[in-house]
Amino acid sequence: MRISELSATSGVPIPTIKYYLREGLLPQGEHTGATRAEYGDTHLRRLRLIRALLEVGRLPVAAIGKIVAAVEDEETPVHRMLGTAHYALSPPVETDPADEVYGAARERVDRLIDGLGWQVTRGAPTRDELAQVLMRLEQLGRAADEDELRHYAETVMGLVAAYEMGKVPMDGPREVAVESLVVGTVLYGKVFDVLRRIAHESASARLLGIPPEPDA
């Protein structure tokens, strides 16, 4: 298909497609003339991935470039490719190696992960992200104890993470796997958060003996 058809089919404006081509986010089309090129399903899948990373993941172009490079490199194992996408979704965390409070929080995170037997790389930004949260909880006088942390962790793995990762198509196109991971992590993460708040209201009513509202 011509670039105009690619734009119409994908819903991505032609100038934006040309920008993705210049930035290397989208592979070049097959040249059929001095100023003409043909595009196919591969380009449609890549545009779908880019849109998911931009619009759902809210990732900067530089981060998307790293993910695309991992997708294109067939030598990069699927697990590492998905990890690249997952880590890109983590918000930046400023850490100070000399900060003893932060250091203690990071040690707690490392002990928790090791104790659970989880396979998580030492440099995973999610370790720093969780350590920062634990540090803030302690500063607010709401420090989570080890049993609480382990309960949350085991619940997440047993009821959420294993289920969600099982829905990622590991044996299909690499773009589709990354897109599925990003959409699942961001949007279903939001679903999980909203459902938890809804459940909090119901649990509060039950604990306090609030009678059900009458039918309208």
Image (cartoon, rainbow, N blue to C red):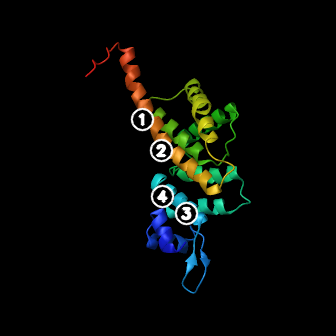
Q: Say left or right for 179 vs 56.
A: right
> Counting other residues with Cα less than 10 Å from the Cα at mark 3, is it few (<14), some (14-19), or many (20 or more)?
some
Q: Earlier in the sequence, mark 1 or mark 2?
A: 2
Amino acid type, callout 2: Leu
Which label sits on residue 44? 3
> Counting other residues with Cα less than 10 Å from the Cα at mark 1, is it few (<14), some (14-19), or many (20 or more)?
few
Check the picture and name the quadrant holding the N terminus: bottom right
Amino acid type, callout 4: Leu
Q: CA distance from mark 3 to mark 1?
A: 32 Å
Where is residue 46 drawn, in percent x and y?
A: 57, 62
Amino acid type, callout 1: Val
Q: Earlier in the sequence, mark 3 or mark 2?
A: 3
Q: Is residue 38 above or below residue 123?
A: below
Where is residue 2 drawn, in percent x and y?
A: 52, 74
Q: Nearer the viewer, residue 145 or 210?
A: 210
Q: Earlier in the sequence, mark 4 or mark 3?
A: 3
Q: Is residue 96 above or below residue 12?
A: above
User: Residue sitting at 49 percent across and 41 percent down?
Assistant: 188
Q: CA distance from mark 1 to mark 2?
A: 11 Å
* Residue 97 in view of the camera: no
Q: Which residue is mark 4?
A: 54
Q: Which residue is mark 1?
A: 194
Q: Label 4's element? A: helix
Q: CA distance from mark 3 to mark 2?
A: 22 Å
Q: Nearer the viewer, mark 4 or mark 3?
A: 3
